[in-house]
Image (spheres, helix red, strand yellow):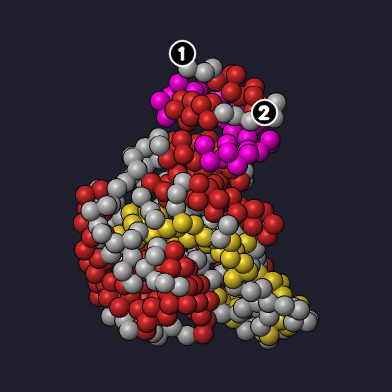
Amino acid sequence: MGMRPQDIIRNKRDGGELSREEVASFVRGVVDGTWADYQASALLMAVYLNGMTTVEMEALTQAMLGSGEVLDFSEIELPKADKHSTGGVGDKTSLVIAPLVAACGVAVPMISGRGLGHTGGTLDKLEAIPGYRVHLDLSEFRKVLARVGYAMMGQTAEIAPADKRLYALRDATETVESIPLIVASIMSKKLAAGLGALVLDVKTGSGAFMRDEGRARALAKALVRTGHSCGVQTEALLTDMSQPLGAAVGNANEVQECILIMRGESGDEARDVRELSLELAARMVALAGAAGSHEEARRRVERALESGAALERFRRNVEEQGGDPRVCDDPDRLSDLTVREVRVESVHAGYVEAVDAAEIGRALASIGGGRARVEDKIDPAVGYHARARTGQQVSTGEPLGLLYCRPGPKADAAAARIRAAYTVGDAAPDRVPELIKEVIAQ
């Protein structure tokens, strides 16, 4: 006789602590359908309102992880590491990090997501490369991982099936923003790849999922604690997402920016993408045990980038996953000449005081560059090239950035939204936010 859903819901509703058995019973019931959606939703709301202890959160993560297949790549005799970002606007570091880390002798089995709302997803970016396949079965994924040192795919039905159902319910019941539920969702998917090390990039600021720095820090700490409790070396970086990362936003032009970084041809505007990619990659290499210290790991990833080794891995991965490797030699192949370029000009002179990065992401989504619903199709050519950074002086009529769009009234509305996302004032801001705010290792 299992536990009654009503008893578990009542316990949490009244502020009690759920036992491991109660948490496991809930997750099992979600997967096998013995818990109705309305019962699961009631428990999610009780968790949202009353929170969870560390022990409950770890029990939830482990139960969700155990709800599906945990992959075993032990036949690949390299250390295994991955990274996860909580998402943002122009956040494309995975495309640079995976080949960088692979070039340093660490295998990266990267199970990634799609973009939703104002944030972009790694899978959508990769699909901007003609022919690139992200739907691999596990044997193909293994093969690419063994041959190239990294592979990229979407979450399969076998991995953390409880998360798929719970995510849909959280979305429909406004319970997404709960730290324990976020932790269990992220970690149950990431740890299913049988990792030795995991580095998390937790964003904060106007374009982040958690805008508030205090809550972002609490999330980072909870993620790191849970990773350690599951036996995985885990670190988190708290990083700035108060403006787009790099200049490129949108799928094809973000891939272009990454290839230029790996070719050593990126300019100053991509410096933060390059810096953050190197730092996250170095931490993965060090945590996985492939370098004796963070300094040594940092030197190795810098060498892998500058020598062209990372680009070579990227090229091999594109080939193995069915994409056109010529984009590595000529990133302009990713440009779509049928899109129109619209200058988004500053209305007055002054200094860029703030940018609402999420609004830029939403404006792009409104013209096909992202999705509001999971089933929406994406136009990879739609994008934005951010020129003006926080703290920069601009004159009237100077472009804050360039919008790439299909002609029509939606494009004009999107350009207006992006223009309104910039606050231009008379004085330069006192301080421009640091890219990396904190490293959380405990």
Query: Is-magenta flag for residue 36?
Result: yes
Q: Residue at x 59, y 33 (%)?
A: 44
Seen from the viewer's position, the closer of residues 95 and 199 is 199
| Residue 151, position as x, y percentages in the image | 30, 59
Name the amino acid type tagged 2.
Gly
Question: Circle 2: is it few (<14), some (14-19), or many (20+) Cα within 10 Å?
Answer: some
* Residue 338 appears in the rendering: no
Name the amino acid type tagged 1.
Met
Picture layout, residue 37 above or below residue 112: above
Magenta: main secondary structure equals: helix
Seen from the viewer's position, the closer of residues 113 and 65 is 65
Question: Circle 1: is it few (<14), some (14-19), or many (20+) Cα within 10 Å?
Answer: few
The answer to whether residue 166 is left or right of residue 317 is right
Q: Residue at x 31, y 81 (%)?
A: 308
Picture layout, residue 98 above or below residue 181: below
| Magenta region, residue range | 31-60
Q: Which residue is mark 2?
A: 16
Question: Dividing the picture into quarters, in which one does residue 188 lie?
Answer: top left
Q: Which residue is mark 1?
A: 1
Query: Is-magenta flag for residue 14?
Result: no
Q: Residue at x 62, y 67 (%)?
A: 438
The answer to whether residue 321 is left or right of residue 190 is left
